[in-house]
Each structure stands twice: as C-alpha cells, then as structure tokens.
Amino acid sequence: MDPVRNPFAPGAGQRPPELAGRDRELDAFEVVLERVARGRPERSLVLTGLRGVGKTVLLGELRSMALRRGWGAGKVEARPEAGLRRPLSAALHRAIRDLAVRHRAPDRVEQVLAVLKAFALKANPDGAKLRDRWQPGIDVPAAQGRADSGDIEIDLVELFTEVAELAADVGAGIALLIDEMQDVPTEDVSALCAACHELSQSGAPLVVVGAGLPHLPAVLSASKSYSERLFRYVRIDRLDRSDADRAVLAPIEREEAEITPDALDALFTISGGYPYFVQSYGKATWDAAVRSEISAEDVRLAAPEAESELAVGFFGSRYERATPAEREYLRAMAELVEGRDEPAPTASIAQYLERRPSSLSPARDSLIKKGLVYSGERGLIAFTVPHFGRYLLTQD
C-alpha cells in the first residue's frame, strides 16, 4: 500500500470515521435549523460522550451545516478556570461577520458590533491598566448601556437578543457551538442557560450546541433546574458493527482496495467501535498491508504500531497530567474494573488503597477537573477515555 495515500490519515477522507454512523444526529440538527428558520421554538442541543467518539468532529460538521444554510456560526472551546466572555465574544464576532456580507444596512451591523464590544470589554478586570487591558479587535466604539452591566446573565441575554435580531434581518439564524462545555465556569453556565431560556420564549433564531463529557447534563442541571427543558440531550457512543464496518470500508473502496471479512472482524474487536481507534488502527493497518486486499494478519501485525502511537498521543498525554496521588487513584480504578470500560465504586477504591474516602476526595476532584474521570451517578467514578483502564494496567 502507498502510505502517502493512506485514507485513514487525518484529513485524507471525504468523511472521517468520527462521522460514520452519525446520520441521526445530522438529521436532527437539520430539523432544528429548519424549525428555527421558520420562527418556531426549538430546544438547543447538547452532545455527550466519552473522548474519542467524535464529538468535536461532529460539532465541526454541524457548524458547516449552519453555514451552508446562510447562518452565522461561531465555535468556542471552553477551558477550565477561564471565563466565557472572551472566547464567546470571538465566536460571535465571527458569526456576525458571516451575516454582515448579506446585510443591507452596515449601520445596523455596526450597532450590534458595538454591543458585542461592550460585552467583550467586561472581560477585563476592574482597575486594570490600559496596557494590560484586552482589546477584542472590533473596529467600532463600544456601546453604552447594553450588555455592559458586568452581570454576565443580564449581559448575555441582551447580547444574544441583539445578535439574533441581526440574523433575523437577513432571514437566517445564529449557531453557537461550545466544545468541552463541562469546563464552562459555574456562573457562566448559569448565565448561558438563562439566555437560552429567554430566547426560547421569544422564538429568536439562535441555537446553542454544546458538547461535553457524560456528566455534562448533571452540570447543567445543577446550574439551572429548568435546563432539562432547555436542551435536547444526545448521547454519542461508539459505533455499532455496521457503522464501524462502513467507516473502514468506505475509505478503502475509494482507494480501489479490498479488505477481508476476517480483517473487518479483527478491526472491530481491537478498536471496540470507537471512532478514534477505528481511525488509528485503520491507518496502521493500511501502512502495514503489502497487498491491495487487507487481511486479518495485516491487522495483527499493525496493532503494536497503532497501540504505540495511542500510548503516546492519546493515553500518555493525559496520564502525564496526573500527579503521583492521582495516578495511584487511576491505577486503583483500573485494577478494580480489570481494565474494562466500567465505573468503579468510590468506596471500593478507598478500600483497595486502604485509605479513608475523604482523604481521596482531593485526587478524585482534581481528576474530574482535568477531564480524566467523571461521575455519572453518586458513588461511582469512570474513565472519560475508552480503554484507559486497559492502558494503565500495562504501565509499571
């Protein structure tokens, strides 16, 4: 096989494996766009799932769908301990620019940009020196008395209203996509829910699409009790067998190559159907194959290379972020579930380590903040990364 034409390499295929089997989600978003465009109320969307199931790639495709509809679209990647004002301002600035080329009243666009700038400037701490103040790069004077109160809940409602009205002027909408949504600070999550609630009541053409780890619904619910009514929650999981096979077959057939049924069996077994692993093992197998028909033996020979790359780039990069105490906790989890992708009882972890449960809380809470584990329900803890337990059991 020609490694230069490896169809499993990032960016090589027309549709990466992360999007195989996501037709249901794409169709659902198409319905959202259509309903909002017709002025009908529609809930915003929240995608949840483990790492490696393709949430970020799916968000990118949803953004492209909105743009093809003539919408304004902006994407934010939330970061722990970082406020939402700055990245949200940049995302909405991009969305407004998408709409500005179609708007017939430049003055109206500038009015909205002035409100956005007023909102953005409140990201600067009070009393900050001029040289230390962040400038959002919006070339109009900031508005006064609109989205500049300093209370992000009030300001976000006013900003969303202005931006949505601008979109309505051109018969379009705004899609705001937020990745790693579980990392949005508590105050900002509350403000975001309040703004979505306010706009849903008025039928304004603005939708939020969030993506995050499996405990994101609990984060939203803890922020606002009515969040369950605001969002439609969609669980993004590993691919079933038919979709996993399609993710492998489609790029291979585009390159006019073939793969045996036994090789498909082997790839599904070793990848577990997780899109990131399908791509990783598929890439390594393509590089290892010497004939145009890929065999199960090619998969077997390629597996160590794929696992070596995963150990460094996927598992290792996350494991390195953990402190010694946190690694001890992670290893105990892996031992208790015997490397399976299953939750472990926190009480059993304490018993295994012969420690009081309260003494392990700092390590557990830090691991949750770092996005390495999550608690789907009280008393249970699980890895956010598929096969992470299996990887940990191979580490000395």
Image (spheres, helix red, strand yellow):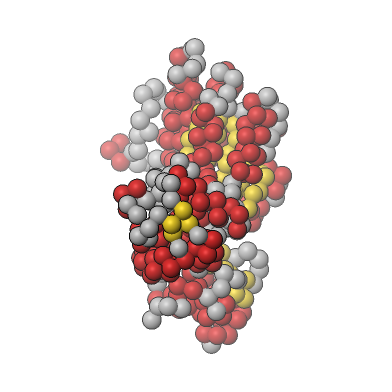
The percent position of residue 105, horizontal first and vertical second, equals: 49, 12
Q: Which quadrant is home to the N terminus?
A: bottom left
| Residue appearing at x 46%, y 53% in the figure | 258
Q: Nearer the viewer, residue 70 or 351?
A: 70
| Residue appearing at x 65%, y 39% in the figure | 28
The percent position of residue 355, horizontal first and vertical second, equals: 53, 84
| Residue appearing at x 43%, y 40% in the figure | 86
**Which residue occupies the extreme top position in the image?**
104
Determine which quarter of the picture holds residue 288.
Answer: bottom left
**Which residue occupies the extreme left position in the image?**
131
Is 74 on the left-hand or right-hand side of 32? left
Determine which quarter of the picture holds residue 127.
Answer: top left
| Residue appearing at x 50%, y 47% in the figure | 250
Is 164 on the left-hand or right-hand side of 317? right
Q: Which quadrant is home to the C terminus?
A: bottom left
The percent position of residue 113, horizontal first and vertical second, equals: 45, 24
- Relative to residue 118, is residue 386 depicted above or below? below
Q: Nearer the viewer, residue 157 or 178?
A: 178
The percent position of residue 116, horizontal first and vertical second, equals: 47, 29
Is 391 on the left-hand or right-hand side of 229? left
Is 38 on the left-hand or right-hand side of 14? right
Number of numbered markers: 0
- Relative to residue 75, is residue 309 depicted above or below? below
Res. 191 visible in picture? no
Res. 24 visible in picture? yes
Determine which quarter of the picture holds residue 171.
Answer: top right
